[in-house]
Image: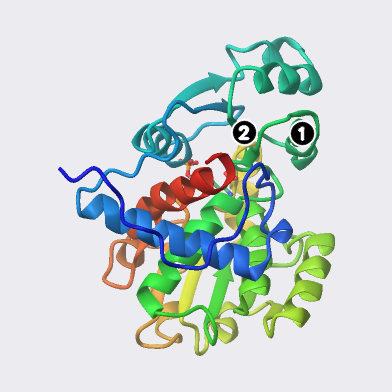
Amino acid sequence: MITEAKEINFHKQELKGRSFLTLADYSQNEINYLIDLADYIKKQKREGIAFEPLKGKTLGMIFEKSSTRTRVSFEAGIYQLGGLGIFLSSKDIQIGRGETIADTAQVLSGYLDGIMIRTFSQETVEELAAKSSIPVINGLTDLYHPCQVLADLQTIKEIKGKLQDIKVVYIGDGNNMAHSLMIGAAKMGIELVIAAPEGYHPDTSVTDKAKAIASEHHAKVSIEANPFEAVKHADVIYTDVWASMGQEAEQLKREKDFAGYQVNAALIENAKEEAIFMHCLPAHRGEEVTAEVIDGKQSVVFQQAENRLHAQKALMTALMG
Ligand code: CP
Ligand code: NVA
């Protein structure tokens, strides 16, 4: 095995010490840098070249919700970068027994070099970052899922060769995924259409913010009721579960309310022939997407999932390196 990574030859952005709470805080150049670094890290790994800029560094990973991809990709990622990941379930740490976020932030800042947190409210992540002296990474809140969208942007660029002049259509719930896609698309000059039923539109504050960002980046963010209209000329069709973590009690109501918003073969026939299907996973086959589509040839969901590893290794390298 070769142990020396080659010189990074794309324009470096200085991100050391920053937190990653939403893509709204990052410029187009900074996001492009993270995507380029993720591609580089992926290639190094494929070639068996060790890339260990975080030797001796430690990442704490607080989880107040379940996870497969986020947990495993962060833990494997920090290890591959030469560091250590510590899994901190809220069931086991004192947060679960009422210790404040502010105290936790200050204590963990004395031990660690970075914190990744998956929780309910975005305010919790913001408070953690405000009270920590080390970078905090948002591993999903009810409002945003920026790590997923960073990997998704890498995936779209990898497949389509570009991010500009791309139309992404998100079908379903105006949730954390929809919100982060709106912000990410707006930043990167992507046209994004959200097709969601009445009552499940994205938050107005996020929509307003995304539209304002879009106007500065030749991007377009809009909401459309009819999924068949929305997917016309789409390069990417994206969906997510109808009931997110914490909404389990609404499952049956949501199944009824989202009828007509399933991504199936009839729907994707209306998109471009070379359109790809994306889903952050976990997926519910037979609900938001049919097995035929998610297991079909247009689906790139496992490439997306793999890119979580590379994109987050880039993020940790840039923030904690
Ligand atoms: N997409 C995603 O974040 O998956 P996990 O919930 O498994 O982490
Ligand atoms: N919207 C989903 C995304 C899971 C990765 C949820 O919050 O449960």
Residue linked to disc 2: 117
Please, what secondary structure does the residue beneath circle 2 have? strand
Q: Is residue 57 above or below residue 148?
A: above
Query: Residue at horizontal 52%, vertical 41%?
Result: 321
Residue 186 in the image, given as x and y percentages of width and height: 68, 73
Q: Quadrant of residue 221?
A: bottom right
Residue 288, can we see it?
A: no
How far is disc 1 from disc 2 in space, using C-alphas? 9 Å
Q: Position of residue 302 (x, y in %)?
A: 33, 55
Residue 48 placement, left or right of 9? left
Describe residue 201's horizontal placement relative to residue 208 as left or right.
left
Question: Crowding near pointer 2: few (<14 within 10 Å), some, many (20+)?
Answer: many
Position in image of residue 43 (x %, y %)? 29, 58
User: Mark 1 or mark 2, which has the lower sequence index?
Assistant: 2
Q: Amino acid at mark 2?
A: Ile
**Render colour scheme:** rainbow
Outermost left residue: 1
Number of numbered discs present?
2
Residue 216, above or below 103: below
Residue 124: give its label.
1
Marking on residue 62:
none
Q: Amino acid at mark 1?
A: Thr
Provide the secondary structure element on which disc 1 rests: helix
- Which residue is more in the foreground, 14 or 122? 14
In the rendered image, which quarter contains the N terminus? top left
Residue drawn where x is 46% and y is 81% of the image: 235
Q: Nearer the viewer, residue 49 or 142?
A: 49
Q: Residue at x 24, y 48 (%)?
A: 49
| Residue at image location 78% in from the left, 39% down from the top | 126
Do callouts 1 and 2 mark residues in contact (Cβ within 8 Å)? Answer: yes
In this picture, residue 314 sits left or right of residue 226: left
> Vertically, is 224 above or below 289?
below
